[in-house]
Image: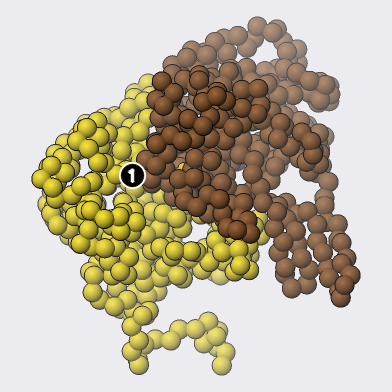
Amino acid sequence: MQERLKQKALELLENGTADRILGWKIGEFFYDLTPAVFKTRQEIQEEFVYSPFAGANLSKYLIAESRKGGKVAVFLKPCDSYSFTQLLKEHRIWRENVYVVGVQCGGMCDMEKLRAKGCEGVLSVGEDGENIVVETLYGTNVFPRAELLEDRCITCKSKKVVTFDELIGEQGTELESDRFSQVAQLEAMTSQERFAFWQKELSRCIRCNACRNVCPACSCEKCVFDNPGSGVRNKAAADSFEESLFHIIRAFHVTGRCTDCGECSRVCPQNIPLHLLNRKMIKDMNELYGTYQAGADPDTKPPLTDFTLDDEEPSIVHTRGGQ
Amino acid sequence: MKKIAISKLNDLFSAISKEKVLYIPADDGANQARFTPWQEGLTLTDKLNTVRSAKDLFFPQVENLVNFKNSGKAIQIIENRTEPQPFVLFGVRACDCRSFDILDRVFLSDPVDTFYKTRREQGVVITLACNRPTETCFCGVFGIDGADPQGDVTCWMDEAALYWRANTEKGEALTAALPMLTDCAEEAIDPIAAKIRSILSKLPLNDLDLTGFNRDRMMELFNSPQWEDLSQSCLGCGTCTFVCPTCQCYDVQDFDDGQQVRRFRCWDSCMFSDFTMMAHGTNRPTQKERFRQRFMHKLSYFPNNNDGIFGCVGCGRCLQKCPIHMHIVKVAKALKEDLK
Ligand code: SF4
Ligand code: SF4
Ligand code: SF4
Ligand code: SF4
Ligand code: SF4
């Protein structure tokens, strides 16, 4: 796969389809890839990598990249293509300046899972059929690939690349996924239990803003939490009230636009399952307004910006029996 | 040198916590470790290190400074400073222990930060040699020895026992209060240290070469054309800063809650767009300048002002946690090219 992508990158650069390529760049180890723009043949040959550790979703970089002039080619995995399409819908990306190569994906691996299995001092990985072979300072370990998959990949919603100019690999389909089962478990809790669950999870937050900054749906030029004039104290992470508000406001703000790409949970240095907040919103929307998948196409109107007279009007006052 | 059987660790922790509040690195239920106040039943983590560094205990993320109340032209000052209680920090790794030296140079030089100073005075640091260093560790580059850390007390562990060596007066005083520690030969730790050193010698980042990052090359590094590429995909989050044991910047903010004004200080990150915002705006308008600041501070400005001591201890946290994996090793190796 890596070779096919590399060849494609070289071809697009050389036949003038694009003057630069957005992809993943080699790191110190096998897993620490960095999103990068490649401008020369040599850079691509020496530094371009596509591997089970190319988890980073490149679509958000296109907001800036597509405005720079010239044409950028990008590789998008199926879930990345949903983010890309959602950004097109929001007119955040200049489509004519982007050439999209869709790539099929067998699921990305999670270093945290490797470490959770006691693997430290990892030096290299190899693939052996469905197994991942890990060489470490302390010996060799072999794990079935499935055990190392990122959580978001275990519950992958779709292998379909929704927007592309060309595809590498077969086009995939939407999948039956039980991604809402954990949300259902939370819903089954009493409100006190649920409150305790989120207090415990969010109490670990260090307010680094990685979840927001990586999120393709969080593309405001200036976030309210970064505006010192807003009256919100962004950095008072210890204030649990303010802290929870950050996450809840963010979840509301991306509702209808969150494609469930899973980047927020992937990047959180404190392993907070942020995707559960967003999935709750998606599940509620599906139940109230009919199934809707953000980023699945560039045209349909999201339920929250499309008013009809017989829309549900859920309200906390109403469900609590108030007037 | 003293020792105690691993099976008696609980008794040791229990005895220490009768003297002072004891923090140990323990699993937090999210597949990671953090320093947690010990209570009956809490056990040491198997993880090499905590995600949040040990600096948290001396320089917490948020701390209240003072409250004000305005009525007419009068301002009432409400002191809400709480003096920290004596505490013991067990299980600090050599890298984090060295980070205290770096923080001391910042907070204990004039004007002394009394909040930090009191915590340093109240805290006893017990370090623990690293039995299983990992690939992101590069403490050795800074002359830090994972097999023989500093601190008030140094500990080593094997399957059978925990070995204990007091290094300072504070350490001796604590040792004297712990009769369950029994005497043993100094050589007892030699095989453990030798085993650790053999792993340390094989770490893949040992070849990181930081020679030449001198004051006279500072402007050259600052003006390096590489900053553009290095910073191109940085998210401007605070992850690298907040997990780093040596990052020391903070902001002081006033929060008007309608009743009173609460003045607090909190960690800040040079990676944030509103860092050191001034009346005219910001002097680091794009992520490139912010990114450059973090790495120039650690690799150039700090050593230039501090006898050549780098502002990094090689703990590897930013290597593991940066969402885009653009970390200090990649930056240092790239800059080294400019110095050739
Ligand atoms: S909220 Fe999370 S899952 Fe949703 S689009 Fe943003 S990063 Fe992706
Ligand atoms: S990434 Fe995690 S720790 Fe950082 S602000 Fe988001 S939830 Fe908090
Ligand atoms: S810069 Fe990175 S490796 Fe160095 S001390 Fe900070 S977190 Fe650790
Ligand atoms: S960097 Fe060195 S001292 Fe720190 S955890 Fe790794 S081996 Fe131990
Ligand atoms: S270097 Fe990495 S951790 Fe630091 S601000 Fe940039 S993206 Fe975040």
Q: Residue, x 41% and y 26% (percent of image)?
A: B338
- Colour mode of the rendering: by chain
Q: Which chain is brown?
A: B
User: Where is residue B154, by image quadrant?
Assistant: top right
Q: What chain is tagged by disc 1?
A: A
B157 on left or right of A33? right
Horizontal side, residue B322 vs residue B8: left or right:
left
Residue shown at the point (66%, 47%) measured from the top left: B250
Q: Does ligand 5 reach within 8 Å of label 1's beta carbon? A: no
Residue A185 on image: x %, y %:
44, 63
At 34% from the left edge and 53% from the top edge, which residue is drawn? Answer: A61
| Place of residue B77 in the rendered image (x, y in percent of width and height, measured from the top left) | 87, 61
Please, is residue B95 above or below residue A260 in the view? above
In the image, B240 versus A191, the foreground residue is B240
A169 relative position to B148: left or right: left
Q: Is residue B229 visible?
A: yes
B197 is higher (above) or lower (below) than B208: above
Q: Quadrant of residue B19?
A: top right
Q: Which residue is mark 1?
A: A35
Q: Colour of chain A?
A: yellow
Q: The C terminus of chain B is located in which quarter?
A: top left
Q: Is residue B173 left or right of residue B268?
A: right
Q: What amino acid is labelled 1 in the image?
A: Pro
Figure check: A29 above or below A291: above
Closest to the observer, A286 or B4: A286
Please give the name of the residue rendered at 33% of the width and 44% of the height, measured from the top-left corner. A35
Kindly state the secondary structure of the residue where label 1 is placed: strand
> In what quadrant of the picture does the N terminus of chain B appear?
top right
Q: Position of residue A51 (x, y in %)?
A: 26, 39
For label 1, count other residues whose C-alpha is less than 10 Å away and answer few (under 14), some (14-19) or many (20+).
many
Location of residue A195 with respect to A315 vertically, above or below: above
Q: Is residue A78 visible?
A: no
